[in-house]
Image (cartoon, grey):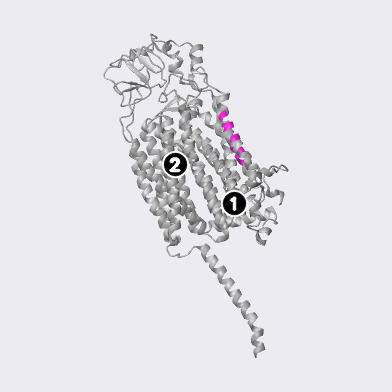
Amino acid sequence: MSASAECGIGRCEPSLLRKWANIKCFTGVYSVTGLLTASLSMYIISQITSIEKQFGLSSSKTGYLMACNDIGYSLCILIASYFSNRVHIPRFLSVSTMFYGVSGIICSLPHFMFKPAPIAVSSATNPMPMFSMGSNICRNKTDYASMPMMNNMSSFSGPSDTTGSVDSTASNVTMALIAIGMVLQGIGKAPRYPMLAQYLDDNTSNRDTGYYMGIITSTAIFGPAIAYGLGGLFSRIYVTLEDVDLHPMDPRWIGAWWLGFLAFGIIAIIVAVPLLCFPAKLKKSLTVKSRTPAESRSTTGTICQEFVGVFKSILKVLRVPAFSLMLFAMIVNVLGMSAGMSFGPKYLEKQFNIPAWHANIILAAVGIPSVCLGSFIGGLLTKKIKLNPPNCIILILCTQIPSIALQIISMFLNCDQPEIYNWSDQRSSSLPVSCSDSCNCGTTFLPVCDSQGFNYFSPCHAGCSQGSFMKFTNCTCIPDGEVSTGLCQFKCNMLWPFMIVSFFASFISSCMMMPIFIFNMRIVPNKLKAMAIGISALSMSLFALLPGPVIGGKLVDHACVLWSNGDSGSCTFYNIDTLRFNLFGLGICGRAVSIILVSLILKITWNMTEWPGTLDKMSEVDFVIESDKKKTNKELLPEMKSLK
C-alpha cells in the first residue's frame, strides 16, 4: 500500500489510524470543521451593536469590516480552484481552517488591547456623586458636565478621552485588526468548496459525490444558527465578565462580543489538526477514477497558456445570453438581501426595542430553519419536476413573486417611532410644563423611562436630583418622581407577526436556490459547467456579498438621528421609519429588477425543450452510433466480397 494512502503526518503513519482512512470518516471530520467555520463567518453580524458601542464605530465602518471577508474570498477563489487538483487537499483544507482560527483570535485582540475598566473599579477610582443616593443630578451646566456617568457614556464601555469621545487610535487599531481577521476568514473560505468537491469526486463514485457533499453542506447550514445562538448568549454577559447593576436594555450595556471570536478561533485550530492526517488519496478509492488523457494533458501546458484558456472559457460562458442575464438578476437580488441581512439583528433591536441577545435568539430560532427547509424543498422540486429551461425559469418566478409580496408586507409590520420628551431636536416632543429648564442639562443621550411609559432624554432632562446606576429619583417632571434607564417598552405587538411573515418570505426565497444552481450549470455546454459555477460564485461574492454590507451600513447610518460624539462615533438613536424603508426598499427594488430580468430569460428560453448539455450528450451518442455503423460496415465488407 502506498504511503500516500495512509493516515498520518509525514512519515508518522500509526497503524491505529489506518482504519480511519476512508471517505465516511473524512466527511464526518470535515462536517464538524465546516459547521465551525460557517459559525465563525456569521458571528460578527450578531455582535455589531456591541462592537460599535465599545469602539465608537458607525454602521458604515462595520459594513466595511463585514465586506473584508469577501475581499479575501474574491482574491483567492480562482487560485484555489486552479490548484485544487495539484495539492494535498486535506492538508490544504486543514491550513485554511487554521486561518479561520487565527482570524478569530485576531478579531478578539482589540478587547484585550483596549480593555474597558470594570465598572466596580471605575466607581472606586472615580467617585461620582450621582452613585450615592442624595447626590444632585439637576445642577448647573458646569457641574453637570463634570459627571462622567452622564456626559461620558464611554466611561464603562471602552477607551475614551476626557471629552467623552472614543479614542480615535483605539477605533483605528480595532478597525485594522478586525479587517485583517475578516480577510483571513475569506482566504480560509476560498479553498473550501472547489477543493472539497475535487477530493470527494476523486475518492468516490459519481453517484456518491453529491451524497457526501450534501451531508457537509447541510451540516454547515446550521453554522449561522450556532453563531446567532451563542451570540445571543454572549450578548447577555457584560463585556468585562463582571456582575454589574445594568440590564441589557440599558444604553450603556455592551455584550461580551470578544468571547465568541476567541472560543471559535481556538476550537477551529484544534479541529483542523485531524484533517492533516488524511492522505491525498484514500486507499479504498485509488482506482475509483482515473484521469483521462485530456485531463492529464491539461496539467502539462505552460501557465500562460492555461490562463489564456481560462479567460477564453469565461468569455464563452458569458456569451450565453440566458446565463449572463440570470447572473445579473441574482447579483441585484442578493445585493439587496445581503444589505438587510448584515444588519438584521440591529434592525430587530431598534424597530421592536428588544435587547441584542433577544434579536440573535429570534434569528437563530426562526431565520435559519426557514432557509434549511426552503433549500430542501427547492432541491426536492428540482428532483420531482422534469426541468427544461422554461420550466426551470417558471419555478424560479413562482418563488420570487410571492417573496417580493411578503417583503412588502414585512416592511409595513412596524412599530411607532418612540418619542423623547424634553428633547428640543425632536419636533413631536413637548411637555406642558418646562420642568427641567433650570438644570442646564448636557447633550449626552441616556434615555430614561417613567412609570407612565414616557421617555426622557436623560435623568437630568427628567428633572431628577438623585440616582444610581439604573434608578433615578426626586424627578420633578415625573408624577411619582422615579425613572429607570433605557427606552420604555413599545406598545407594539408586531414582532411576532413580522417574524412569521419573514419566515415564509425566507422559506420561499430559499426554494429558488437549487433551481438557479441547476439553471446556471445546465444552460451552458457540458465542458463549461465548472467554469459557470466558478463565475457565479466569484461574481456573487465580488458584486453582491462584498458591497452589500457596505451599502447596508450607509443606509443604517442615514437613519441615525443622534450620534455618540456629535456627528460621528456610534449611533445612539435611530429614526426607525427611515431605517425600515431604507433596508426593505433596497431589497424590494433588487427583487423587482430580478423578476424583470428572469421574465426576459423566460422569453429567450421559451422554445428550448432541452438543455445545451443534453444536446451535447446526444451529439456524442450520435457520433458513437455513426462510428459503430462505419466500423460494422468495414468489418462486413470483406465477408461480402468473399461471398461473391
Residue situated in front as seen by the camera: 357 or 164: 357
* Residue 614 is covered by the magenta coloring: no
Q: Quadrant of residue 171?
A: top right
Q: CA distance from mark 2 to mark 1?
A: 27 Å
Q: Residue furthest left?
A: 432
Which is closer to the viewer, label 2 or label 1? 1
Left or right relative to 578: residue 87: right
Which secondary structure class fits the magenta region best? Answer: helix
Q: Amino acid at mark 2?
A: Ile
| Magenta-colored stretch includes residue 104 | yes
> Left or right: where does residue 456 sit relative to residue 346?
left
Give above or below for 308 relative to 163. below
Tell which circle, 2 or 1, labels the residue nearer the N-terminal end. Answer: 1
Residue type at tag 1: Leu
Residue 368: mark in rendering:
2
On residue 4, which mark appears?
Answer: none
Q: Secondary structure at mark 2?
A: helix
- Range of the magenta residues? 96-108
